[in-house]
């Protein structure tokens, strides 16, 4: 299936299976810091809120802080959270997903070792609704493909049940 066809399907239906958010599993930002190399102000996930290893799906959340400096300059007077940062949220959630998939465990390693990767492509992105200050969005990602060198995810940013953004991202493993 080509990327445009996948993106069109992501615009219509949430990726998260219905029971993903009722598992009682979560990780806070301190745990996310053990998985990702990102730090403030560029750590863009607040909590991991659902994980299905069999279906390779992960959900995370992020509250868009009205005081975030990026909002002062992005459409002043009518601030909108930038689409590029929404794609970055999808990418960060994807890295978390691949970390759990690599170990086939919901647990974070005792000696965590963030995956060493670099973004290689944004295969496409669609922005459907504005993400605004004060909103708490859900970021859902699902594994698309993986080999020893490259991995890709499809992802959505969702607010109040509405899909705000959809993207396909690819990374290269550095080791």
Image (cartoon, grey):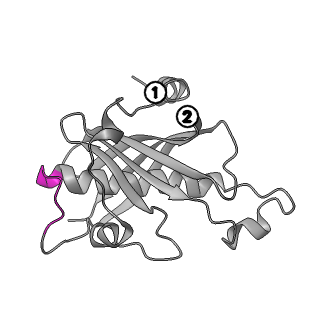
If you read the primary sequence from the N terminus, does the residue marked by circle 1 or circle 2 appear first? 1
Disc 1 secondary structure class: helix
Q: Residue at x 46, y 47 (%)?
A: 139
Q: Residue at x 39, y 43 (%)?
A: 141
Task: Give how far across and how far down residue 146 sits, in percent.
Answer: 24, 43
Q: Which of 109 and 2 is in front in this view?
A: 109
Our reading of the magenta stretch's main secondary structure is loop
Residue 120 seen in the current view: no
Residue 127 seen in the current view: yes
The segment highlighted magenta reads: 102-109
Residue 47 in the figure: left or right of residue 7: left
Q: Which residue corresponds to mark 1?
A: 6
Query: Between tags 1 and 2, which lies in front?
Result: 2
Q: Which residue corresponds to mark 2?
A: 161
Residue 28 is drawn in which quadrant? bottom left
Decide whether residue 105 is among the magenta residues: yes
Residue 126 in the figure: left or right of residue 52: right
Q: Quarter of the image containing the N terminus?
A: top left
């Amino acid at each position: 299936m080509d990327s445009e066809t996948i993106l069109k399907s992501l615009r219509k239906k949430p990726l998260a299976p219905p029971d993903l958010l009722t598992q009682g599993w979560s990780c806070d930002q301190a745990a996310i810091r053990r998985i990702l190399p990102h730090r403030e102000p560029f750590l863009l996930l607040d909590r991991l809120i659902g994980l299905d290893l069999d279906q390779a799906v992960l959900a995370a959340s992020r509250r868009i802080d009205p005081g975030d400096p990026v909002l002062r300059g992005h459409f002043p007077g009518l601030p909108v959270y930038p689409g590029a940062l929404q794609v970055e949220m999808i990418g960060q959630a994807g890295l978390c997903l691949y970390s759990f998939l690599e170990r086939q465990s919901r647990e974070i390693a005792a000696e965590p070792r963030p995956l060493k990767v670099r973004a290689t492509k944004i295969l496409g992105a669609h922005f459907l609704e504005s993400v605004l200050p004060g909103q708490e969005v859900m970021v859902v990602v699902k594994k698309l493909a993986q080999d020893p060198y490259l991995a890709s995810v499809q992802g959505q940013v969702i607010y109040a049940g509405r899909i705000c953004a959809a993207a396909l991202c690819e990374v290269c493993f550095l080791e």
